[in-house]
Amino acid sequence: MLPFLRYAAIGATGVTLDLVVFALLFNVGGVHEQVANALSTTLGIVCAFLLNSRFTFGKRDRMLSRFARFYGVGVFGIGVTTVALHVFATGLGVDPNLVKSATIPCVAVLQYWLNKKWSFA
């Protein structure tokens, strides 16, 4: 269970970075919610990859290949969030900040499993 706890703690760092950048881009900068989501999530993914590769999975080989896989798993998360933002924010008028926050725990466990079995196997 310890690796998952490390993954979760590192994920919290990436998520915090993601949410702060999203809020700044969307709320302060006036960037469209979908663009802000793609940019902020990408930054969070890069941060999480670098930390997870060292501290959670202890893998420092084949970094480019591992990053491509990790990013692919992250893109899955972007896709889920993009669909949720379209359905709930655009379609139903729910605050995009709330939608963005609610999607994070929904994909975290699946992303851990995919990263453990594929990105860092």
Image: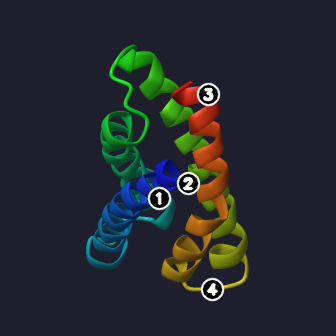
Q: Where residue 19 appears, x then y in whole percent?
A: 38, 69
Q: Quadrant of the N terminus?
A: bottom right
Q: Where residue 104 appears, x then y in whole percent?
A: 56, 66
Tell me the residue that label 4 is attached to.
94
Q: Where residue 12 appears, x then y in whole percent?
A: 40, 64
Tell me the residue that label 3 is attached to.
118
Q: Residue at x 46, y 17 (%)?
A: 65
Q: Which numbered dot is residue 49?
A: none
Which is nearer the eye, 2 or 26?
Answer: 2
* Mark 2 residue type: Met
- Decide which of tag 4 and tag 1 comes sooner along the chain: 1
Tell me the residue that label 2 is attached to.
1
Q: Which of pointers 2 and 1 indicates the residue nearer the eye?
A: 2
Tell me the residue that label 1 is attached to.
5
Question: Viewed as shown, does residue 8 lie left or right of 29?
Answer: right
Q: Are marks 2 and 1 in contact (CB under 8 Å)?
A: yes
SS for dot 2: loop
Does residue 76 show up? yes
